[in-house]
Image: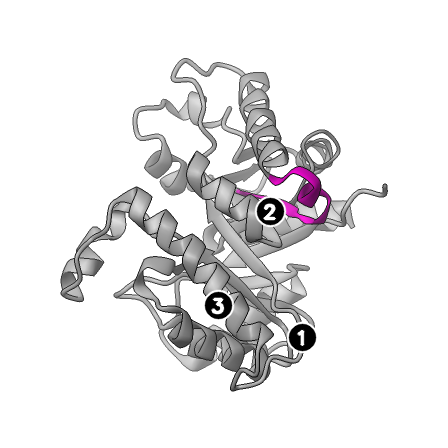
Amino acid sequence: MAPRPFRFSVGFGGADSRAELRKKAQQAEDLGYDVITVPDHLGMISPFPALVTMAEATNRVHVGTMVLDGAFYRSAWLARDVASVAQLTDGRFEFGLGAGPDFAKPEFEALGLPFPSGRQRIEHLRDLIVDTKALFAGDHQPPVHHHIPLLVAGSGDRLLRVAAEHADTISMAGIPVDADIDSDEIGDAALGRRSQFVRDAAGTRFADIELGLTVQAVEVEGHGEVDLTLPRMFQPDFSDTQLRHLPGFLHGSARGIADTLRRYRDEYAVSHFSVNETQMTALAKVIEDLR
């Protein structure tokens, strides 16, 4: 079977104006990205109107959520908004969903909602996916005329099992690694174990799943200083050297990183890579080399 084509996603936290948001979307499209996304947090721009605005400013690139906090939603409400955005973006919407991270607890407090346990959030996510898909399969309004791709992002075993059962794309984040990591080979082995976990959980579905990796940092030779904010958030006790060995930390020449991504695809079936906007121009050099 031929390998899946690479797909690259970049996430934007928002903008100070409509014009700036449109400009960001156009730049991402010009740099070769396949998907542009926004997160779902209080204190940030509302994802659905932002996505419609970015879709209107572009021609090819898809728009999506990375990711909606599933614990905030109920299926009927979510199905209405997802179907509306899919319609208003002419089918370019990709539906990214997560269980809700532990650090979102203050957002629940701000909304006056109890904060469920991790297990409860994952169980709710599973039910939310099943119920929303069932609504789309019926006589839903607004109408759903095509399949809306579902991406599920996360790292834990329970969440990945739900994703393996239901998602079109799985974006692995925060790959578990040993505390004494001291080489890229150890990081690669950790990625291989996580990929195999998804493969085993998905069974025969695995051939239909696009497997992805959340890229925490991109350090391209000659491109300037790397932003370590995200890898430090995932691994606050690691040294800078250890962070560079994480599978989500891409470093080297553009050609060397491109070779790394080819290896990730060939050996671990990972073909979808997502970065935040601080890494956008750095990864664009790699995208150019791959294409």
- Disc 2 marks a residue whose amino acid type is Phe
Q: Which mark is residue 146?
A: 1
The residue at 39%/62% (across/down) is 13
- The part of the chain drawn in magenta is 202-214
Asked if one can make out residue 146 in the rendered structure from this viewpoint, the answer is: yes
- Disc 3 marks a residue whose amino acid type is Thr
234 lies left or right of 7: left
Nearest to the eye among marks 3 and 2: give it: 3
Residue 40: image location, x then y, percent: 37, 63
Distance (Cα) linking label 3 and label 2: 26 Å
Q: Sort mark 3 into few (<14), some (14-19) or many (20+) by Cα contacts within 10 Å.
A: some
Q: Which mark is residue 132?
A: 3
Of 130 and 106, the residue lying toward us = 130
Q: Helix or strand or loop: what does disc 2 sit on?
A: strand
Residue 202: image location, x then y, percent: 62, 40
| Circle 2/circle 1 CB separation < 8 Å | no
Q: Earlier in the sequence, mark 3 or mark 2?
A: 3
Distance (Cα) linking label 2 and label 1: 24 Å
Residue 252: image location, x then y, percent: 61, 31
Q: How many marks?
A: 3
- Tag 2 residue: 273
Of 163 and 235, the residue lying toward us = 163
Nearest to the eye among marks 1 and 3: give it: 3
Q: Earlier in the sequence, mark 2 or mark 1?
A: 1
The residue at 37%/50% (across/down) is 123
